[in-house]
């Protein structure tokens, strides 16, 4: 089945397969073709170019998209969309003056979600999670990473990861699974953190590896959660199963979590709302990609990741949602891109690069998605009629997506 899109006002993020990510000043360049065509064959992008060079071959379907733009779907490299219920009450508690950290100390936060999840059947959890996945695909997300970490028992962590596996089987967007058993210390291990870490290392990791339930390993490396030493221990243990680290670090404190993550060749370090000069230097000498989560900063009213400092030091940066019930109950990548421009002073070019090609890199999916590239999946967004691509972040809160194509097929 061949489909030809013609009269595309601007085809955005056109790249050669050799471009795996963009860093520093490269991030300010967004290659596009004005008045373009795009040809797809079955699930794959097979050709694109200027309308002046439109191929004369016959196709099964021709779609005229005059005045509309096409860009690759968003690549959301950090989410927790498998969760049970919500934490609306904590939202109100914060409005009334409690901080996110105070709520967690009082037994709310991640432990609150863990309790709810443990009491929810796998079937119900799947249903709630699938609904969120469908919601974000409609918002233009065409590849996603999903973490466990609201189970905190062997059984409940496996339940979460099996739900992610089912989502992988039933939905056609690329999904990567991350094991985040070290998300919080469960109540019953409050005074025995070592016991919980032993459970992760001796029971959870081997079982997850045996059932092939995870691609990545994550840890919440933070004061009051898991220390640098804990992170080192867990990442060392995870290595023998081939789980690649993607680590929650520097959300509230800089405690050398970046250093230990880089030492373990982490694919990404995520959050970085607090970033020291030492952290920056370590990142400059690494291949680990920083990931910013501006919707989390927005929702919790905490500092934004210093994107300018990161990019102006020649580093790459990816943007993701962090969709979860506590710190970011939103999976809208369009809002993330807008907020990155408005609050982090990223240009539209930088933000779009960060949310597409660099997001793909942060999930090891740079050969499959993240750019309009021959051979990559035909996962792309057709916009409504817009004057320029800068209009996407500019018109924050407005849905400018007309249609989303996944594997060459439009979604309802
Ligand atoms: O990335 N910071 C750690 N984990 C999540 C939030 C967890 C929660 O509050 O449920 C995050 O923000
Ligand atoms: Fe997170």
Image (spheres, grey):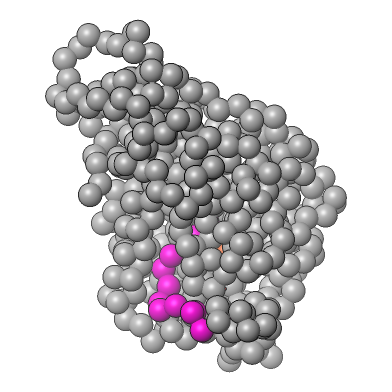
Residue 209, placed above or below residue 394: below
**Image point 69% across, 73% down: which residue?**
226
Residue 210, placed above or below residue 103: above
Q: Main secondary structure of the magenta part?
A: loop
* Total numbered labels: 0
Position of the N terminus by quadrant: top left
Q: Is residue 186 visible in this depiction of the protein?
A: no
Residue 353, placed above or below residue 75: above
Q: Of 6 and 282, which appears nearest the observer?
A: 6
How far across and down, in percent of the image, does residue 272 sit?
Answer: 70, 56
Q: Which residues are magenta?
A: 78-90
How far across and down, in percent of the image, does residue 108 sit?
Answer: 58, 85
Res 124 → quadrant: bottom left
**Image point 33% across, 51% down: which residue?**
138
- Residue 58 vs residue 177: left or right? left
Q: Is residue 343 visible in this depiction of the protein?
A: yes
- Residue 368 vs residue 395: left or right? left
Residue 170, placed above or below residue 63: below
Residue 80 magenta:
yes
How far across and down, in percent of the image, does residue 213 sit?
Answer: 41, 62
- Residue 331 vs residue 193: left or right? left
Q: In which of the image's four quarters is ligand 2 placed?
A: bottom right
Q: Of 164 and 234, which appears nearest the observer?
A: 164
**Image point 43% across, 73% down: which residue?**
83
How far across and down, in percent of the image, does residue 35 sit?
Answer: 38, 18
**Image point 39% across, 30% down: which residue?**
69
């Amino acid at each position: 089945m061949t489909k030809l899109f013609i009269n595309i006002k601007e085809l955005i993020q056109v790249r050669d397969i050799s471009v795996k990510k963009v860093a520093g000043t490269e991030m300010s360049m967004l290659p596009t073709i004005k008045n373009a065509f795009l040809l797809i064959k079955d699930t794959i992008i097979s050709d694109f170019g200027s309308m002046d060079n439109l191929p004369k071959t016959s196709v099964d379907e021709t779609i005229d998209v005059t005045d509309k733009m096409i860009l690759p779907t968003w690549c959301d490299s950090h989410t927790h969309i498998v969760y049970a219920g919500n934490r609306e009450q904590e939202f109100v508690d914060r409005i009334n003056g409690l901080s996110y950290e105070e709520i967690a100390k009082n037994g709310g936060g991640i432990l609150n979600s863990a309790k709810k999840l443990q009491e929810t059947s796998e079937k119900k959890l799947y249903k709630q999670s699938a609904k969120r996945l469908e919601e974000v695909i409609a918002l233009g997300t065409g590849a996603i990473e999903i973490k466990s970490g609201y189970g905190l028992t062997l059984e409940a962590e496996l339940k979460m990861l099996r739900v992610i596996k089912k989502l992988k089987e039933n939905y056609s967007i690329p999904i990567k699974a991350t094991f985040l058993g070290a998300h919080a210390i469960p109540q019953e291990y409050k005074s025995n953190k070592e016991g919980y870490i032993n459970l992760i290392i001796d029971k959870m990791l081997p079982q997850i590896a045996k059932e092939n339930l995870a691609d990545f390993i994550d840890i919440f490396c933070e004061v009051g959660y898991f220390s640098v030493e804990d992170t080192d221990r867990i990442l060392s243990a995870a290595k023998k199963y081939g789980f690649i680290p993607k680590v929650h670090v520097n959300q509230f404190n800089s405690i050398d979590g970046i250093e230990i993550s880089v030492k373990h060749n982490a694919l990404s370090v995520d959050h970085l709302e607090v970033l020291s000069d030492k952290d920056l230097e370590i990142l400059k000498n690494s291949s680990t990609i920083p990931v910013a989560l501006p919707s989390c900063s927005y929702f919790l009213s905490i500092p934004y990741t210093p994107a300018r400092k990161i990019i102006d030091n020649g580093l790459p940066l990816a943007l993701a949602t962090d969709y979860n019930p506590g710190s970011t109950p939103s999976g809208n990548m369009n809002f993330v891109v807008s907020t990155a421009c408005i609050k982090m002073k990223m240009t539209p070019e930088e933000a779009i690069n960060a949310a597409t090609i660099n997001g793909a890199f942060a999930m090891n999916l740079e050969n499959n998605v993240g750019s309009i590239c021959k051979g990559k999946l035909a996962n792309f967004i057709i916009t409504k009629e817009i004057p320029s691509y800068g209009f996407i972040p500019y018109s924050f809160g407005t849905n400018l997506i007309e249609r989303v194509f996944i594997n060459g097929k439009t979604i309802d």
